[in-house]
Protein backbone atom coordinates (compact mmCIF):
# COMPACT_ATOMS: atom_id res chain seq x y z
CA UNK A 1 0.00 0.00 0.00
CA UNK A 2 1.26 3.48 -0.92
CA UNK A 3 0.49 6.60 1.10
CA UNK A 4 0.04 9.97 -0.64
CA UNK A 5 -0.51 13.32 1.09
CA UNK A 6 -1.57 16.11 -1.28
CA UNK A 7 -1.57 19.68 0.02
CA UNK A 8 -4.22 21.11 -2.32
CA UNK A 9 -7.53 20.04 -3.81
CA UNK A 10 -6.05 20.21 -7.31
CA UNK A 11 -3.11 18.02 -6.36
CA UNK A 12 -5.45 15.45 -4.83
CA UNK A 13 -7.55 15.34 -8.00
CA UNK A 14 -4.42 14.87 -10.10
CA UNK A 15 -3.20 12.04 -7.90
CA UNK A 16 -6.55 10.28 -8.02
CA UNK A 17 -6.84 10.76 -11.78
CA UNK A 18 -3.33 9.56 -12.59
CA UNK A 19 -2.77 6.95 -9.90
CA UNK A 20 -6.23 5.99 -8.71
CA UNK A 21 -6.60 5.17 -5.06
CA UNK A 22 -8.87 5.75 -2.15
CA UNK A 23 -9.17 8.98 -0.16
CA UNK A 24 -9.53 9.13 3.59
CA UNK A 25 -10.38 12.00 5.89
CA UNK A 26 -9.35 10.41 9.16
CA UNK A 27 -8.63 6.73 8.49
CA UNK A 28 -10.29 5.64 11.73
CA UNK A 29 -12.02 2.77 9.90
CA UNK A 30 -9.10 1.64 7.72
CA UNK A 31 -7.80 -1.07 10.06
CA UNK A 32 -11.27 -2.50 10.87
CA UNK A 33 -12.08 -2.58 7.15
CA UNK A 34 -8.80 -4.33 6.36
CA UNK A 35 -9.44 -6.91 9.06
CA UNK A 36 -12.90 -7.47 7.61
CA UNK A 37 -11.32 -8.31 4.26
CA UNK A 38 -12.44 -5.20 2.41
CA UNK A 39 -10.35 -4.31 -0.64
CA UNK A 40 -8.97 -0.82 -0.04
CA UNK A 41 -6.75 -0.74 -3.10
CA UNK A 42 -3.04 -0.04 -3.28
CA UNK A 43 -3.02 3.77 -2.94
CA UNK A 44 -4.31 5.75 0.06
CA UNK A 45 -4.71 9.52 -0.34
CA UNK A 46 -4.71 11.48 2.93
CA UNK A 47 -6.91 14.61 2.73
CA UNK A 48 -5.92 16.02 6.12
CA UNK A 49 -2.87 17.82 4.72
CA UNK A 50 -5.13 20.10 2.63
CA UNK A 51 -5.84 23.31 4.54
CA UNK A 52 -9.26 23.85 2.99
CA UNK A 53 -10.42 20.43 4.18
CA UNK A 54 -9.59 21.14 7.83
CA UNK A 55 -10.78 24.75 7.92
CA UNK A 56 -13.82 25.90 9.91
CA UNK A 57 -15.33 29.34 9.48
CA UNK A 58 -18.57 31.28 9.24
CA UNK A 59 -19.17 33.17 5.99
CA UNK A 60 -22.15 35.44 6.36
CA UNK A 61 -24.84 33.17 7.83
CA UNK A 62 -23.29 29.91 6.67
CA UNK A 63 -20.86 27.58 8.41
CA UNK A 64 -18.14 26.21 6.13
CA UNK A 65 -16.67 23.03 7.59
CA UNK A 66 -13.78 21.23 5.95
CA UNK A 67 -14.70 17.61 5.28
CA UNK A 68 -11.57 16.34 7.05
CA UNK A 69 -11.89 18.60 10.10
CA UNK A 70 -11.46 16.53 13.28
CA UNK A 71 -14.79 16.19 15.05
CA UNK A 72 -13.06 17.29 18.26
CA UNK A 73 -12.57 20.71 16.64
CA UNK A 74 -16.35 20.99 16.25
CA UNK A 75 -17.42 19.68 19.65
CA UNK A 76 -14.98 22.07 21.34
CA UNK A 77 -16.18 25.08 19.33
CA UNK A 78 -18.75 26.88 21.52
CA UNK A 79 -20.26 28.83 18.62
CA UNK A 80 -20.80 25.68 16.57
CA UNK A 81 -22.30 23.86 19.55
CA UNK A 82 -24.64 26.78 20.22
CA UNK A 83 -25.90 26.76 16.62
CA UNK A 84 -26.08 22.97 16.18
CA UNK A 85 -26.22 21.21 19.56
CA UNK A 86 -27.71 18.07 17.99
CA UNK A 87 -25.10 17.82 15.25
CA UNK A 88 -22.32 18.52 17.76
CA UNK A 89 -23.67 15.74 19.97
CA UNK A 90 -23.77 13.31 17.03
CA UNK A 91 -20.22 14.23 16.03
CA UNK A 92 -19.12 13.69 19.62
CA UNK A 93 -20.40 10.11 19.55
CA UNK A 94 -17.96 8.98 16.83
CA UNK A 95 -15.61 6.73 18.77
CA UNK A 96 -13.42 7.67 21.73
CA UNK A 97 -11.78 10.99 22.53
CA UNK A 98 -8.64 9.76 20.77
CA UNK A 99 -10.60 8.74 17.67
CA UNK A 100 -12.27 12.15 17.53
CA UNK A 101 -8.91 13.81 17.02
CA UNK A 102 -8.92 12.06 13.61
CA UNK A 103 -12.57 11.33 12.76
CA UNK A 104 -14.45 13.78 10.54
CA UNK A 105 -17.88 14.56 9.18
CA UNK A 106 -16.63 13.75 5.69
CA UNK A 107 -15.39 10.33 6.68
CA UNK A 108 -18.51 9.57 8.71
CA UNK A 109 -20.68 10.46 5.72
CA UNK A 110 -18.67 8.80 2.96
CA UNK A 111 -18.15 5.52 4.77
CA UNK A 112 -21.89 5.28 4.09
CA UNK A 113 -22.76 3.35 7.23
CA UNK A 114 -26.53 3.36 7.85
CA UNK A 115 -25.75 3.92 11.54
CA UNK A 116 -23.43 6.92 11.13
CA UNK A 117 -24.16 9.27 14.04
CA UNK A 118 -23.53 12.63 12.38
CA UNK A 119 -25.55 12.01 9.21
CA UNK A 120 -29.16 12.27 10.52
CA UNK A 121 -28.22 15.54 12.21
CA UNK A 122 -26.59 16.86 9.04
CA UNK A 123 -29.66 15.87 7.03
CA UNK A 124 -32.14 17.67 9.30
CA UNK A 125 -29.92 20.76 9.20
CA UNK A 126 -29.98 20.60 5.38
CA UNK A 127 -26.21 20.40 5.11
CA UNK A 128 -24.72 20.60 1.62
CA UNK A 129 -21.62 18.75 0.44
CA UNK A 130 -19.19 20.56 -1.87
CA UNK A 131 -17.69 17.88 -4.11
CA UNK A 132 -14.51 18.16 -6.20
CA UNK A 133 -13.35 15.84 -8.95
CA UNK A 134 -11.79 15.58 -12.39
CA UNK A 135 -15.04 16.74 -14.00
CA UNK A 136 -15.21 19.91 -11.89
CA UNK A 137 -17.02 20.86 -8.72
CA UNK A 138 -20.64 20.46 -7.66
CA UNK A 139 -22.73 20.99 -4.56
CA UNK A 140 -25.30 18.42 -3.46
CA UNK A 141 -27.33 17.77 -0.34
CA UNK A 142 -25.71 15.50 2.21
CA UNK A 143 -28.67 13.13 1.85
CA UNK A 144 -27.68 12.49 -1.78
CA UNK A 145 -24.20 11.18 -0.96
CA UNK A 146 -24.85 7.72 0.56
CA UNK A 147 -26.75 5.38 -1.75
CA UNK A 148 -26.49 2.19 0.31
CA UNK A 149 -24.29 0.51 2.91
CA UNK A 150 -20.71 1.31 1.92
CA UNK A 151 -21.81 2.96 -1.32
CA UNK A 152 -21.97 6.62 -2.36
CA UNK A 153 -23.00 8.67 -5.37
CA UNK A 154 -19.46 10.05 -5.75
CA UNK A 155 -17.78 9.25 -9.07
CA UNK A 156 -14.22 8.14 -9.75
CA UNK A 157 -11.76 10.69 -8.41
CA UNK A 158 -14.46 12.68 -6.58
CA UNK A 159 -14.36 13.55 -2.89
CA UNK A 160 -16.14 15.90 -0.49
CA UNK A 161 -14.17 19.08 0.12
CA UNK A 162 -16.36 20.85 2.66
CA UNK A 163 -19.85 21.21 4.05
CA UNK A 164 -22.10 24.26 3.96
CA UNK A 165 -24.65 24.53 6.78
CA UNK A 166 -26.82 27.62 7.16
CA UNK A 167 -27.06 29.02 10.67
CA UNK A 168 -30.48 28.44 12.25
CA UNK A 169 -32.88 31.33 12.55
CA UNK A 170 -34.19 32.47 15.92
CA UNK A 171 -36.61 29.95 17.36
CA UNK A 172 -34.95 27.01 15.59
CA UNK A 173 -32.74 24.25 17.00
CA UNK A 174 -31.91 20.56 16.62
CA UNK A 175 -31.36 17.39 18.62
CA UNK A 176 -29.88 13.95 18.03
CA UNK A 177 -30.21 10.81 20.13
CA UNK A 178 -29.37 7.16 19.61
CA UNK A 179 -29.73 3.78 21.30
CA UNK A 180 -26.69 1.49 21.54
CA UNK A 181 -25.95 -1.79 23.36
CA UNK A 182 -23.22 0.02 25.32
CA UNK A 183 -23.21 3.61 26.49
CA UNK A 184 -19.94 4.50 24.75
CA UNK A 185 -18.06 3.67 21.55
CA UNK A 186 -20.73 1.55 19.92
CA UNK A 187 -22.74 1.63 16.70
CA UNK A 188 -26.28 2.98 16.82
CA UNK A 189 -29.09 0.44 16.79
CA UNK A 190 -31.29 3.41 15.91
CA UNK A 191 -30.45 7.11 15.65
CA UNK A 192 -32.86 10.03 15.29
CA UNK A 193 -32.30 13.68 14.42
CA UNK A 194 -34.92 16.43 14.67
CA UNK A 195 -34.89 20.12 13.85
CA UNK A 196 -37.79 22.25 15.09
CA UNK A 197 -38.81 25.85 14.49
CA UNK A 198 -41.27 27.54 16.87
CA UNK A 199 -43.22 30.76 16.90
CA UNK A 200 -43.41 32.98 19.97
CA UNK A 201 -46.25 30.87 21.42
CA UNK A 202 -44.29 27.64 21.23
CA UNK A 203 -46.19 26.35 18.21
CA UNK A 204 -44.21 24.40 15.62
CA UNK A 205 -43.88 26.20 12.30
CA UNK A 206 -41.45 23.77 10.69
CA UNK A 207 -40.07 20.31 11.46
CA UNK A 208 -37.44 18.10 9.87
CA UNK A 209 -36.88 14.54 11.08
CA UNK A 210 -34.41 11.87 9.95
CA UNK A 211 -33.68 8.34 11.12
CA UNK A 212 -30.46 6.35 10.95
CA UNK A 213 -29.80 2.59 11.15
CA UNK A 214 -33.37 1.67 10.15
CA UNK A 215 -32.82 1.43 6.38
CA UNK A 216 -29.92 1.24 3.90
CA UNK A 217 -29.55 5.04 4.10
CA UNK A 218 -30.80 7.80 6.38
CA UNK A 219 -34.58 8.16 6.09
CA UNK A 220 -36.53 11.43 6.18
CA UNK A 221 -39.96 11.15 7.81
CA UNK A 222 -42.28 13.64 6.07
CA UNK A 223 -45.34 12.13 7.76
CA UNK A 224 -43.94 12.97 11.19
CA UNK A 225 -42.86 16.40 10.04
CA UNK A 226 -46.34 17.24 8.75
CA UNK A 227 -48.24 16.28 11.91
CA UNK A 228 -45.99 18.45 14.08
CA UNK A 229 -46.60 21.68 12.19
CA UNK A 230 -49.20 23.67 14.11
CA UNK A 231 -48.70 21.65 17.30
CA UNK A 232 -47.76 23.20 20.64
CA UNK A 233 -44.42 21.65 21.60
CA UNK A 234 -43.34 23.56 24.73
CA UNK A 235 -45.10 24.65 27.90
CA UNK A 236 -47.77 23.00 30.01
CA UNK A 237 -50.14 22.23 27.15
CA UNK A 238 -47.87 20.26 24.80
CA UNK A 239 -49.80 18.52 22.04
CA UNK A 240 -49.19 14.90 23.02
CA UNK A 241 -51.44 13.63 20.25
CA UNK A 242 -49.14 15.24 17.68
CA UNK A 243 -46.08 13.71 19.34
CA UNK A 244 -47.75 10.29 19.34
CA UNK A 245 -48.63 10.67 15.67
CA UNK A 246 -45.06 11.68 14.83
CA UNK A 247 -43.71 8.65 16.68
CA UNK A 248 -46.11 6.37 14.82
CA UNK A 249 -45.10 7.88 11.47
CA UNK A 250 -41.43 7.35 12.32
CA UNK A 251 -42.00 3.69 13.15
CA UNK A 252 -43.96 3.25 9.92
CA UNK A 253 -41.08 4.73 7.89
CA UNK A 254 -38.59 2.11 9.09
CA UNK A 255 -37.23 -0.67 6.92
CA UNK A 256 -34.62 -2.22 9.24
CA UNK A 257 -32.89 -5.58 9.38
CA UNK A 258 -32.60 -8.23 12.07
CA UNK A 259 -29.05 -8.64 13.29
CA UNK A 260 -27.12 -9.43 16.46
CA UNK A 261 -27.56 -5.85 17.71
CA UNK A 262 -31.32 -5.46 17.30
CA UNK A 263 -34.46 -6.99 15.85
CA UNK A 264 -36.77 -5.42 13.31
CA UNK A 265 -39.50 -5.05 15.94
CA UNK A 266 -37.15 -3.43 18.44
CA UNK A 267 -35.68 -0.97 15.94
CA UNK A 268 -39.13 -0.03 14.66
CA UNK A 269 -40.42 0.69 18.17
CA UNK A 270 -37.30 2.57 19.29
CA UNK A 271 -37.41 4.82 16.21
CA UNK A 272 -40.74 6.23 17.36
CA UNK A 273 -39.50 6.69 20.92
CA UNK A 274 -36.38 8.56 19.79
CA UNK A 275 -38.30 10.82 17.44
CA UNK A 276 -40.58 11.92 20.27
CA UNK A 277 -37.59 12.52 22.55
CA UNK A 278 -35.60 14.48 19.99
CA UNK A 279 -38.60 16.58 18.98
CA UNK A 280 -39.15 17.55 22.62
CA UNK A 281 -35.44 18.30 23.11
CA UNK A 282 -35.13 20.32 19.89
CA UNK A 283 -38.31 22.26 20.72
CA UNK A 284 -37.02 23.14 24.18
CA UNK A 285 -33.78 24.40 22.68
CA UNK A 286 -35.65 26.32 19.98
CA UNK A 287 -37.74 28.06 22.64
CA UNK A 288 -34.52 29.29 24.27
CA UNK A 289 -33.07 30.77 21.05
Image (spheres, rainbow, N blue to C red):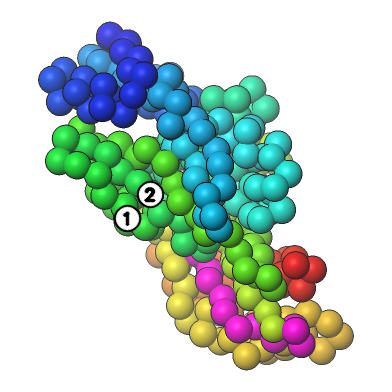
Counting other residues with Cα less than 10 Å from the Cα at mark 1, is it few (<14), some (14-19), or many (20 or more)? some
Question: Residue 182 or 174: which is nearer the viewer?
Answer: 174
Is 219 drawn above or below residue 156 in the view shown? below
Point out the stretch of residues depicted in magenta. Answer: 200-212
Quarter of the C terminus within the rendering: bottom right
User: What x and y, as percent, mark residue 80?
Assistant: 65, 47
Instruction: Judge left or right: residue 114 versus residue 247.
Output: left
Question: Element type at marker 1?
Answer: strand
Q: Give me the residue at 37% from left, 38% from top.
A: 161
In which quarter of the view is residue 131 placed? top left
Instruction: Judge left or right: residue 85 versus residue 138.
Output: right
Question: Element type at marker 2?
Answer: strand
Q: Which residue is mark 2?
A: 129
Tell me whether circle 2 and circle 1 mark residues in contact (CB < 8 Å).
Answer: yes
- Residue 140's disc is 1
Residue 150 visible in rendering: no
Is 209 covered by the magenta stretch?
yes
User: What x and y, as percent, mark residue 124?
Assistant: 51, 63
Instruction: Pick whichever of labels 2 and 1 is earlier in the sequence.
Output: 2
Question: Residue 238 or 78: which is nearer the viewer?
Answer: 78
Amino acid sequence: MRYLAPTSVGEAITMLTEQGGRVFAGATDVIPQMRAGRDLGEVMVDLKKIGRLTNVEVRGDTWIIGAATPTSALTSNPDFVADFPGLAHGAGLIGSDQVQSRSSLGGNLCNASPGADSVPAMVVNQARAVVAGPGGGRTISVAEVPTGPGQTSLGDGEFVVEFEIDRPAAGTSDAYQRVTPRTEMDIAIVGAGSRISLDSDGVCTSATIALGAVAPTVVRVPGAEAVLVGAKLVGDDVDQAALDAAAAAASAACNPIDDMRGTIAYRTHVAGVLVERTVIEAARRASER
